[in-house]
Amino acid sequence: MDAGLAKQRIAQLSDEIRKHNHNYYVLSQPTISDYDFDMLLEELIRLESLFPEFREADSPTQHVGGEITKEFRQVVHQYPMFSLGNTYSENDIRDFEERVQKIIGKDVEYVCELKFDGVAISLTYHNGRLIQAVTRGDGVQGDDVTQNIRTIKSIPLRLQGTGYPPHFDIKGEIILPRASFENINQQRIEDGEEPFANPRNTVSGTIKMLDSAEVAKRNLDCYLYYLQGENLPFQTHYDSLMAARSWGFKISEYIVRCKTVDDIFDYLKMWDHERHNLPFDTDGIVIKVNAFKQQDLLGFTAKSPRWAIAYKFKAERVSTRLTSIDFQVGRTGTVTPVANLEPVLLAGTIVKRATLHNADIISFHDIRVGDMVFVEKGGEIIPKIISVDLSQRPPELNQFHFITHCPECGTLLQRQENEAAWYCPNETSCPPQIKGKLEHFISRKAMNIDSLGEGKVEILYDNKLVLNIADLYDLTYEKLIGIEKIYFSTDEKKEKRISFREKTVSNILKGINASRDIPFERVLYALGIRFVGETVAKKLAFHFGSVDALINANKEHLLEIEEIGEKIAESVLKYFANSESLELIQRLKTARLRFEIEAAAKTLKSNNLEGMTFVVSGVFEQFSRDELKKTIEEHGGKNIGSISSRTSYLLAGNNMGPEKRKKAEKLNIPIISEESFLQMLK
Ligand code: IVH
């Protein structure tokens, strides 16, 4: 095909596919068959691969995914992400109304919306294009998950219609419809993986996946509920959402305006019942003051707006018989009692098991095997036992005694003062604890050996090839080839076997080998020392510089470090006082893992900007350009002179050349202010 024609056809196909995506995923009103749609998409993918120069930066083929992310960049929210005050009672809603009226007077209109039970997201649009998608994180800064979010087909990559502000943020919730959740879990069970607990957890796991093509397969959806920007051309929240709908965003159909508390209660009562008929989870309703001027008058507390409140639905409750109690040992050795129940219908699903949390709860409610118990379902797939129906207790039931020994390895259980849980202290040879340690070791933020994920470490453990983390580095091709996993296929209703083939084995060995380059602070985190999370590991690594210095540290040395308290210090000391830990570290050293901060990093103030590249341009208020560049390097970042697709941020001051800005916008490179940059260092 000639280039001119190709260019034209690519533009035409892109437009058409955008329109069909909106019809299908936002309006639920497709106007062509799935087959015809696939044909259009395939044609576009093919033409884009032949003529990449004509591919639009926001082409609808991005919904297919394919970009691999190595690490999610932290981004400071331009508008922090607040949470909402929660209530479970109608009286609290009356109190809310009173508080509002005290400040505003009687003339207030409210908007009632569903409270989506998913994962909050902040989308940034610049000149009608999606440029960034960031998770809530701690409310101030979150993970840049733009590549993954681009795969969600109901999120417009390019806006339609007119009147949208040149730059704005829109916040909403990524959700997973229940039917898609069940399909994913079905597949996971067949693949021998742990099923996800609920749709919300699945969403949060999915948006952090590294391969966006995998995310694209998961059928995520997104409702938007909060538009933010400078000088928005709207007087009310409601109008802003209706406008956002006209630009192509998916806005809930069930938003209503209310004048009185009674209108609010009508909405609430209807949805307490009707929510079970929705294809996705909602956990309440949100009530917002409609007029922006009134919202401004009410303002915010430290955590949430005073102009909105969330009413959470009460969980549904039924009674059934407790037939037996099992015990599960978790990754940290905690023993959790689990109740087996006579199957009962609860909130649309049949319930057979419920968590009992811990021994105290069992004795507090005097729960006995054979009792009729009340079971409740909150957001979790596994419901909870709330109480015993004592009026139905058969006279012969014995008091329940918690187990004294670990059901997995037989070790005498222990309990720490002030802690409710019993735990198995046999960290080094209790099977679920070893598996947990191995899984932590290979996880993304630790050694990032993803070729061992998805149940493969478990297979290695079950085949006795890997009994601790150091054993991973003794694996060879000969040991791995042909090892088998037996699983139960629910489709064929029989046991099946799969064995490791050449490709799997070579990927595993490659992954393990690559982990030798992981820097010391992550190796330290990967060891899985109790209370030593990512941040603490970084602090310890940078403070001591090497594992040997850390091993030799005493309590005073440890407590000198900011944010390291008694609990962490004691756990670190205990870990290194154990000869088995020292032996493990010796073996890992022999395997050539990094146990020292790299020479280049020794002079760093932090590695907050590690892996990021900056272009600094313009005139700044607090620092000179050179000072900012130096700061970037001191925190592990790199400076570059010109913008390319590999630039992480354009740090923009006043009077920056328009060309730089244009180029950054074209390549979707986030443009940040001096203020946001300084936030990143915190
Ligand atoms: S408005 C400034 N509207 O609930 C307030 N939030 O605890 C912005 N949520 O983090 C939030 N549905 O993830 C708003 N219709 C809705 C919502 C909603 C769900 C979530 C959101 C937020 C949390 C608040």
Image (tube, helix red, strand yellow):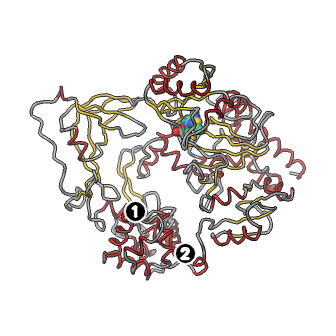
Q: Measuring 63% from the left and 47% from the top, which residue is drawn there?
A: 149
Q: Measuring 37% from the left and 73% from the top, which residue is drawn there?
A: 555
Q: CA distance from mark 1 to mark 2?
A: 24 Å
User: Does the residue at mark 1 contact the one at mark 2 (Cβ under 8 Å)?
Assistant: no
**Residue 531 - label:** 1
Check disc 1 and give the amino acid type.
Phe
Ligand 1 rendered quadrant: top right
Residue 443 position, x and y percent, is: 48, 62
Horizontal side, residue 47 vs residue 546: left or right = right
Q: Residue furthest front?
A: 102
Check disc 2 and give the amino acid type.
Asp
Q: Earlier in the sequence, mark 1 or mark 2?
A: 2
Determine which residue is flagged by label 2. 517
Q: SS at mark 1?
A: loop
Horizontal side, residue 401 vs residue 421: left or right = left
Residue 137 position, x and y percent, is: 56, 51
Disc 2 residue crowd, few under 14, some 14–19, many 20+, Cα 10 Å: few
